[in-house]
Amino acid sequence: MIELTIVQILSLVFFLGVLVFIGLRFFRRRKWVEPTSAIPDSWKNLLEKHVSYYEDLDAAHKSLFEYKTHEFLLNCKITGVEAIVEEKDKILIAASAVIPIFSFPEWKYKNLDEVLLYPDTFNESFETKGKGRRILGMVGTGYMERKMILSKKALRLGFKNETDKRNTAIHEFVHLIDKMDGKVDGIPEALLERQYVIPWVEMIERKLEEIVDRKTDINPYAHTSRIEFFAVLSEYFFERPHLLKKKHPKLYDFLTEIFDQDLTACRRHPMFIGGGR
């Protein structure tokens, strides 16, 4: 008969607990909630006032945008960390999620459970006070998996200033889209058809060289990596599509293919080129 010491028993219990935790984490089946009613008028008013992308849609597409906004908010918790989450913040976060995937009505952010809203910048230890607070947004990994952190100040500024080619929340949701194929590498295989992958990577490399040589108007942060290049270019695409098409026509064409949207075809009625692949 095998006798176990107290330490061995406790170790075994701990090990079994870890296995159960991992099992629940990776094999749980999350029920996706679908909207059963229209969004409140207050939400529509906020979209009309603060989200020009929504304002530029025709009635049918506005209805779809409202549905996707509602769906996102039913399935993603938004929590304030030293910040008050107002209705406006919820709408802007949801709009940031909807805009990049709007041409894909069946898209679900099943790799996101919660958005943490911080008042302003934070550091790599998620601290909101002290030195080294330069981060505006982040997609979580490790114990922060399935979470996103956003600066409330940056979130609002992204929709207030639509000429600076920057929108932090859209940037972070593009990272999440990039991550849907299992890795974050600047190649959104969940959206980009296989034949475009190699040309896209080659285009990135050429443009990264231009950024180093300062021969471009693209935010230098894009040079950090392919990952950041894709997210930074996506901000540019959704904020200043006409300018991107004028200055970087090939990049614009790639992004219309990736997001299935041509935002310069007719700005009042954005054209969704493939109806969602």
Image (cartoon, rainbow, N blue to C red):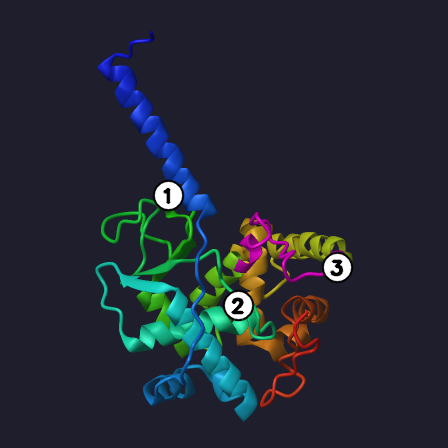
Residue 19 in the image: above or below residue 199: above
Q: Which residue is the extreme one toward the bottom?
A: 59
Mark before the other along the chain sequence, 3 or 2: 3
Residue drawn where x is 63% and y is 58% of the image: 190
Mark before the other along the chain sequence, 3 or 1: 1
Q: Which residue is mark 3?
A: 196
Secondary structure beneath label 3:
helix
Q: Quadrant of the C terminus?
A: bottom right
Label 3, label 2: how far apart the Cα atoms are: 20 Å
Q: Quadrant of residue 107?
A: bottom right
Residue 207, given in percent of the width and then of the height, sits at 67, 57
Q: Quadrant of residue 273?
A: bottom right
Label 2, label 1: how far apart the Cα atoms are: 28 Å
251, 60: nearer the viewer = 60
103, 23: nearer the viewer = 23
Q: Which residue is mark 1?
A: 143
Would you say the magenta stretch is mainly helix, strand or loop?
A: loop
- Is 205 displayed left or right of 67 in the figure? right
- The label nearer to you, 3 versus 2, is 3
Q: Residues within 10 Å of mark 2 (few under 14, many from 20)?
A: many
Residue 86, given in percent of the width and then of the height, sits at 27, 74
Mark before the other along the chain sequence, 2 or 1: 1
Range of magenta residues: 177-194
Label 3, label 1: how far apart the Cα atoms are: 34 Å
Q: Residues within 10 Å of mark 3 (few under 14, many from 20)?
A: some
Q: Say whether residue 169 is magenta.
A: no
